[in-house]
Amino acid sequence: MIRPKTIFVSGPRGGGKTRLVDLMVHEAMQTHPHYLRLIPKHGERSPFLQLVRPGAEAALASSQLVVYNAERCFEVIAEALQTLPPGSSPYIVLLEGDGDPCLRYAYPYDRRIFVMPAPSNIYEVFRTPEQAAVALRKVMEDTADFAAEIFGLFDEDQIEQNTGLLTPEGGSPWSWDRQAHQAITVDEGELRNFIESPIGMEIASRIQLQPEYQGLVESDVILVNVGVGATTGVVDEVARRLELLLSRIRSQAQNDGLLFCCDPCERCDPRRVKLFEKLCLMNHALAS
């Protein structure tokens, strides 16, 4: 059976994810994709929108809501994909979810799109310096499974080589076969060495972001949707800081054509034109 190509569209609630999916289906895709809306099981609200635009259903191969919980999201998403009708050629599945950290690594998505509303304050997106310092120290001193939950699964050998950090017993603090709640002992010198290492730079960069926004770091396309949210000059400063942060952990080639600040419904905006050129190229590559 041919494995589907997957596009994960994520970001904070109310950022315009569903609207972008709708526009992308109609304007940037040559085939009819499947659509899965991921909804957390406990204590959550319904998504703001569903694909209700006239003709939207006709543009989709199928559409369904998938309810998950954090403990079983790996299984639930895989099972939902297996229930889709098999295709005879590469077919695309759009998965839309909010900024739940567990979804980021719940499946090996082929492409990722991050959609966020225009912020009214820099610290809606970025942590304050004090918050970032506390979060970094917590990652350094707390359990390895906490770091895995927040930042995904790391290559243990790479971390040992890059950090040189040891548990009190002399072993790697990231070894999953050791006690799950073994604390890490660090001093200021070890902290500096860790931050200057490649993996430390990436974690330090991620930790500058508020939890709902950390998924943008690994995304292929980032949309700051100025059609929703605030209408202040903060957007320009946030975009500048995001570009600076991404330049520290991604190559120049990876950053080219990555961040877009526009209203996806404003067809005359040249920035919107460039966004959809990028989406068309991405979808064409997946479908071929």
Image (cartoon, grey):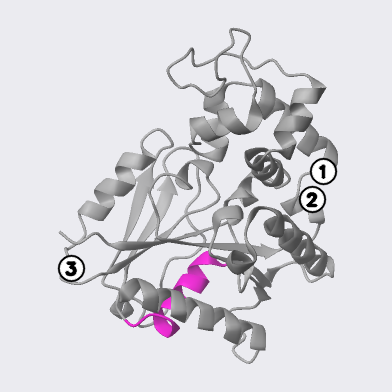
Image position, residue 230 (x, y; %): 76, 66
The amino acid type found where label 1 is placed reads: Thr
- Which picture quadrant has residue 257? bottom right
Q: Looking at the figure, which quarter contains the C terminus?
A: bottom left
Question: Which residue is label 2 attached to?
Answer: 123
Asked whether the beta carbons under mark 2 and mark 1 sit within 8 Å of each other, the answer is: yes
Is residue 29 in the magenta section? yes
Disc 2 crowd rating (10 Å Cα; few below 14, some 14-19, many 20+) is some
Query: Where does the image place residue 145, in percent across and percent down from the top left?
Result: 52, 25
Give the mark nearer the N terminus: 3 vs 2: 3
Kindly check if marks 3 and 1 are in contact, taking CB atoms under 8 A apart as contact.
Answer: no
Residue furthest to the bottom in view is 268
At 62% across and 17% down in the image, what residue appears? 166
Q: Earlier in the sequence, mark 3 or mark 1?
A: 3
- Helix, strand or loop at disc 3? loop
Chief SS of the magenta region? helix
* Horizontal side of residue 104 vs 166, given as left or right: left
Q: Which residue is mark 1?
A: 128
Q: Position of residue 254 (x, y in %)?
A: 58, 65
Q: Position of residue 201 (x, y in %)?
A: 69, 43
